[in-house]
Protein backbone atom coordinates (compact mmCIF):
# COMPACT_ATOMS: atom_id res chain seq x y z
CA UNK A 1 0.00 0.00 0.00
CA UNK A 2 2.95 2.33 0.61
CA UNK A 3 3.94 2.14 -3.03
CA UNK A 4 0.46 2.77 -4.37
CA UNK A 5 -0.17 5.64 -1.94
CA UNK A 6 3.03 7.51 -2.83
CA UNK A 7 2.58 6.65 -6.48
CA UNK A 8 -0.80 8.27 -6.73
CA UNK A 9 0.32 11.40 -4.89
CA UNK A 10 3.66 11.88 -6.67
CA UNK A 11 2.53 11.14 -10.22
CA UNK A 12 -0.51 11.66 -12.45
CA UNK A 13 -3.03 10.97 -9.75
CA UNK A 14 -6.11 8.91 -10.51
CA UNK A 15 -8.56 11.60 -9.58
CA UNK A 16 -11.95 10.06 -10.20
CA UNK A 17 -13.28 13.53 -10.81
CA UNK A 18 -11.49 13.50 -14.15
CA UNK A 19 -13.40 10.40 -15.19
CA UNK A 20 -16.71 11.56 -13.75
CA UNK A 21 -16.76 15.11 -15.04
CA UNK A 22 -14.37 14.88 -17.98
CA UNK A 23 -17.16 15.21 -20.53
CA UNK A 24 -19.17 17.74 -18.57
CA UNK A 25 -16.30 20.21 -18.58
CA UNK A 26 -15.97 20.09 -22.34
CA UNK A 27 -19.58 20.90 -23.11
CA UNK A 28 -21.53 24.15 -22.99
CA UNK A 29 -22.20 25.54 -19.54
CA UNK A 30 -25.96 25.24 -20.11
CA UNK A 31 -25.52 21.48 -19.65
CA UNK A 32 -24.97 22.10 -15.95
CA UNK A 33 -28.43 23.45 -15.42
CA UNK A 34 -31.79 22.36 -16.73
CA UNK A 35 -33.12 25.86 -16.25
CA UNK A 36 -31.84 29.08 -17.81
CA UNK A 37 -30.14 31.72 -15.66
CA UNK A 38 -32.53 34.16 -13.97
CA UNK A 39 -33.16 37.28 -16.08
CA UNK A 40 -31.59 40.58 -15.12
CA UNK A 41 -28.26 39.23 -13.88
CA UNK A 42 -25.06 41.00 -14.92
CA UNK A 43 -22.21 39.15 -16.59
CA UNK A 44 -20.09 38.78 -13.45
CA UNK A 45 -23.08 37.59 -11.43
CA UNK A 46 -23.98 35.00 -14.06
CA UNK A 47 -20.39 33.69 -14.15
CA UNK A 48 -20.27 33.58 -10.35
CA UNK A 49 -23.54 31.64 -10.19
CA UNK A 50 -22.32 29.24 -12.85
CA UNK A 51 -19.06 28.68 -10.96
CA UNK A 52 -20.88 28.02 -7.69
CA UNK A 53 -23.29 25.64 -9.41
CA UNK A 54 -20.50 23.70 -11.12
CA UNK A 55 -18.50 23.59 -7.87
CA UNK A 56 -21.49 22.23 -5.94
CA UNK A 57 -22.18 19.58 -8.57
CA UNK A 58 -18.51 18.64 -8.64
CA UNK A 59 -18.33 18.27 -4.85
CA UNK A 60 -21.56 16.29 -4.77
CA UNK A 61 -20.23 13.86 -7.37
CA UNK A 62 -16.93 13.47 -5.52
CA UNK A 63 -18.84 12.84 -2.30
CA UNK A 64 -20.48 9.82 -3.92
CA UNK A 65 -17.13 8.47 -5.08
CA UNK A 66 -15.64 8.87 -1.61
CA UNK A 67 -18.25 6.43 -0.29
CA UNK A 68 -18.39 3.80 -3.03
CA UNK A 69 -15.76 1.11 -3.66
CA UNK A 70 -14.70 0.98 -7.30
CA UNK A 71 -12.67 -1.87 -8.77
CA UNK A 72 -10.51 -0.88 -11.73
CA UNK A 73 -11.22 -3.98 -13.77
CA UNK A 74 -12.84 -3.23 -17.15
CA UNK A 75 -12.83 -6.95 -17.99
CA UNK A 76 -15.12 -7.82 -15.07
CA UNK A 77 -18.81 -7.24 -15.93
CA UNK A 78 -19.65 -6.92 -12.23
CA UNK A 79 -17.02 -4.20 -11.77
CA UNK A 80 -18.26 -2.36 -14.87
CA UNK A 81 -21.86 -2.56 -13.66
CA UNK A 82 -20.88 -1.29 -10.21
CA UNK A 83 -18.96 1.63 -11.69
CA UNK A 84 -21.89 2.48 -13.99
CA UNK A 85 -24.24 2.50 -10.99
CA UNK A 86 -21.89 4.80 -9.06
CA UNK A 87 -21.70 7.11 -12.05
CA UNK A 88 -25.48 7.14 -12.32
CA UNK A 89 -25.88 7.96 -8.63
CA UNK A 90 -23.30 10.75 -8.88
CA UNK A 91 -25.10 12.27 -11.86
CA UNK A 92 -28.52 12.03 -10.25
CA UNK A 93 -27.34 13.53 -6.94
CA UNK A 94 -25.35 16.23 -8.74
CA UNK A 95 -28.07 17.05 -11.26
CA UNK A 96 -25.82 16.18 -14.22
CA UNK A 97 -26.96 14.86 -17.57
CA UNK A 98 -26.46 11.27 -18.65
CA UNK A 99 -24.85 10.57 -22.02
CA UNK A 100 -28.23 10.00 -23.67
CA UNK A 101 -29.55 13.25 -22.17
CA UNK A 102 -26.50 15.14 -23.48
CA UNK A 103 -27.05 13.66 -26.93
CA UNK A 104 -30.72 14.64 -26.81
CA UNK A 105 -29.79 18.19 -25.75
CA UNK A 106 -27.22 18.44 -28.54
CA UNK A 107 -29.76 17.28 -31.11
CA UNK A 108 -32.38 19.75 -29.87
CA UNK A 109 -29.99 22.72 -29.95
CA UNK A 110 -28.24 21.84 -33.22
CA UNK A 111 -31.42 21.08 -35.16
CA UNK A 112 -33.53 23.93 -33.84
CA UNK A 113 -34.65 26.01 -36.81
CA UNK A 114 -33.83 23.41 -39.47
CA UNK A 115 -36.92 23.43 -41.72
CA UNK A 116 -36.40 20.35 -43.90
CA UNK A 117 -36.04 16.71 -42.90
CA UNK A 118 -33.05 15.94 -45.14
CA UNK A 119 -30.87 18.60 -43.51
CA UNK A 120 -32.13 17.42 -40.12
CA UNK A 121 -31.05 13.83 -40.80
CA UNK A 122 -27.67 14.96 -42.16
CA UNK A 123 -27.16 16.98 -38.98
CA UNK A 124 -27.97 13.91 -36.88
CA UNK A 125 -25.33 12.00 -38.84
CA UNK A 126 -22.78 14.72 -38.16
CA UNK A 127 -23.59 14.71 -34.43
CA UNK A 128 -23.26 10.93 -34.28
CA UNK A 129 -19.92 11.02 -36.09
CA UNK A 130 -18.46 13.76 -33.88
CA UNK A 131 -19.49 11.93 -30.71
CA UNK A 132 -17.89 8.71 -31.92
CA UNK A 133 -21.16 6.78 -32.06
CA UNK A 134 -21.17 3.98 -34.61
CA UNK A 135 -24.17 3.16 -36.79
CA UNK A 136 -23.74 -0.60 -36.58
CA UNK A 137 -27.24 -1.33 -37.86
CA UNK A 138 -27.05 0.97 -40.87
CA UNK A 139 -30.09 2.88 -39.64
CA UNK A 140 -28.97 6.17 -41.19
CA UNK A 141 -29.02 4.78 -44.72
CA UNK A 142 -32.42 3.24 -44.05
CA UNK A 143 -33.83 6.54 -42.80
CA UNK A 144 -32.51 8.35 -45.86
CA UNK A 145 -34.08 5.66 -48.01
CA UNK A 146 -37.38 6.18 -46.23
CA UNK A 147 -37.12 9.92 -46.82
CA UNK A 148 -36.47 9.30 -50.53
CA UNK A 149 -39.65 7.20 -50.71
CA UNK A 150 -41.77 9.91 -49.07
CA UNK A 151 -40.30 12.79 -51.10
CA UNK A 152 -40.83 10.80 -54.30
CA UNK A 153 -44.46 10.33 -53.32
CA UNK A 154 -45.13 13.98 -52.40
CA UNK A 155 -42.91 15.22 -55.27
CA UNK A 156 -41.12 17.87 -53.17
CA UNK A 157 -38.67 18.19 -50.27
CA UNK A 158 -40.23 17.09 -46.98
CA UNK A 159 -40.54 19.91 -44.47
CA UNK A 160 -40.74 19.24 -40.75
CA UNK A 161 -43.90 21.31 -40.31
CA UNK A 162 -45.76 19.28 -42.97
CA UNK A 163 -47.69 17.10 -40.52
CA UNK A 164 -49.48 15.03 -43.16
CA UNK A 165 -46.29 14.10 -45.01
CA UNK A 166 -44.37 13.66 -41.74
CA UNK A 167 -46.92 11.00 -40.81
CA UNK A 168 -45.89 9.13 -43.95
CA UNK A 169 -42.24 9.29 -42.89
CA UNK A 170 -43.12 8.14 -39.38
CA UNK A 171 -44.86 5.13 -40.86
CA UNK A 172 -41.73 4.32 -42.88
CA UNK A 173 -39.59 4.70 -39.76
CA UNK A 174 -41.91 2.32 -37.92
CA UNK A 175 -41.23 -0.27 -40.63
CA UNK A 176 -37.49 0.23 -40.16
CA UNK A 177 -37.73 -0.13 -36.38
CA UNK A 178 -39.74 -3.31 -36.78
CA UNK A 179 -37.19 -4.69 -39.23
CA UNK A 180 -34.33 -3.90 -36.84
CA UNK A 181 -36.24 -5.20 -33.83
CA UNK A 182 -36.23 -1.81 -32.10
CA UNK A 183 -39.16 -1.14 -29.80
CA UNK A 184 -39.97 2.10 -28.03
CA UNK A 185 -40.48 0.27 -24.74
CA UNK A 186 -36.91 -1.05 -24.97
CA UNK A 187 -35.34 2.43 -25.02
CA UNK A 188 -34.41 2.31 -21.28
CA UNK A 189 -32.54 -0.94 -21.99
CA UNK A 190 -30.62 0.68 -24.85
CA UNK A 191 -29.71 3.60 -22.60
CA UNK A 192 -28.44 1.21 -19.94
CA UNK A 193 -26.30 -0.58 -22.53
CA UNK A 194 -24.84 2.74 -23.61
CA UNK A 195 -23.98 3.66 -20.01
CA UNK A 196 -22.27 0.29 -19.51
CA UNK A 197 -20.14 0.87 -22.62
CA UNK A 198 -19.14 4.29 -21.30
CA UNK A 199 -18.35 2.86 -17.86
CA UNK A 200 -16.18 0.13 -19.40
CA UNK A 201 -14.32 2.69 -21.54
CA UNK A 202 -13.64 4.91 -18.54
CA UNK A 203 -12.40 2.00 -16.45
CA UNK A 204 -10.08 1.05 -19.31
CA UNK A 205 -8.75 4.60 -19.33
CA UNK A 206 -8.28 4.58 -15.55
CA UNK A 207 -6.44 1.27 -15.79
CA UNK A 208 -4.21 2.59 -18.56
CA UNK A 209 -3.42 5.75 -16.57
CA UNK A 210 -2.61 3.71 -13.46
CA UNK A 211 -0.30 1.32 -15.32
CA UNK A 212 1.50 4.17 -17.07
CA UNK A 213 1.94 6.01 -13.78
CA UNK A 214 3.30 2.92 -12.06
CA UNK A 215 5.70 2.19 -14.90
CA UNK A 216 7.00 5.75 -14.76
CA UNK A 217 7.42 5.76 -10.98
CA UNK A 218 8.99 2.29 -10.97
CA UNK A 219 11.97 3.81 -12.78
CA UNK A 220 12.59 6.21 -9.90
CA UNK A 221 15.16 5.26 -7.28
CA UNK A 222 12.83 5.43 -4.26
CA UNK A 223 10.55 2.79 -5.82
CA UNK A 224 13.19 0.38 -7.12
CA UNK A 225 12.73 -2.17 -4.32
CA UNK A 226 8.94 -2.03 -4.17
CA UNK A 227 6.66 -4.40 -6.07
CA UNK A 228 4.10 -2.97 -8.45
CA UNK A 229 0.59 -3.54 -7.03
CA UNK A 230 -2.26 -5.04 -9.02
CA UNK A 231 -4.38 -2.21 -10.43
CA UNK A 232 -7.50 -4.01 -9.17
CA UNK A 233 -6.20 -3.69 -5.59
CA UNK A 234 -6.12 0.12 -5.71
CA UNK A 235 -8.90 1.81 -3.78
CA UNK A 236 -9.66 5.10 -5.50
CA UNK A 237 -11.29 6.41 -2.34
CA UNK A 238 -7.80 6.78 -0.83
CA UNK A 239 -6.78 9.25 -3.51
CA UNK A 240 -9.63 11.76 -3.66
Image (tube, rainbow, N blue to C red):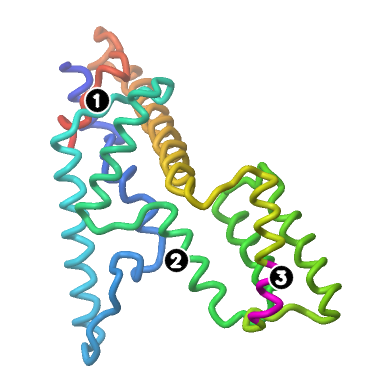
Kindly identify the residue that appears in the image at 35 percent across and 71 percent down. 30
Instruction: Identify whether 87 is placed above or below 143.
Output: above
Work out whether mark 3 precedes mark 1 in sequence or the reverse, and give the earlier one: 1
Work out whether mark 1 precedes mark 2 in sequence or the reverse, and give the earlier one: 1
Main secondary structure type of the part rendered in magenta? helix
Q: Which of these two is toward me, 152 or 206?
A: 152
- The range drawn in magenta is 163-169
Disc sitting over residue 168 in the figure: 3
Kindly identify the residue that appears in the image at 24 percent across and 59 percent down. 95
Distance between the alpha carbons at the discs numbered 1 and 2: 39 Å
Q: Which of these two is toward me, 75 or 117?
A: 117
Distance between the alpha carbons at the discs numbered 3 and 1: 61 Å
Q: Is residue 140 left or right of residue 66?
A: right
Work out whether mark 3 precedes mark 2 in sequence or the reverse, and give the earlier one: 2
Q: Residues within 10 Å of mark 1 (few under 14, many from 20)?
A: many
Q: Which residue is mark 2?
A: 105
Kindly identify the residue that appears in the image at 73 percent across and 78 percent down. 158
Residue 127, position in %: x, y?
A: 58, 61
Q: Which residue is mark 1?
A: 7
- Helix or strand or loop: what does disc 3 sit on? helix
Residue 57, position in %: x, y?
A: 20, 57
Amino acid sequence: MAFSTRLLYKSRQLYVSQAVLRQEVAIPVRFYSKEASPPGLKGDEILKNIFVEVKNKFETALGIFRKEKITIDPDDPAAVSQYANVMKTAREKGGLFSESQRIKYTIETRTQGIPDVRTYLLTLKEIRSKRGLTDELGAEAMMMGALDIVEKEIKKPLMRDDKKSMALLTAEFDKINKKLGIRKEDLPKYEEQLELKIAKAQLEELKKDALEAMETQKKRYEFKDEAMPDVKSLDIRNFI
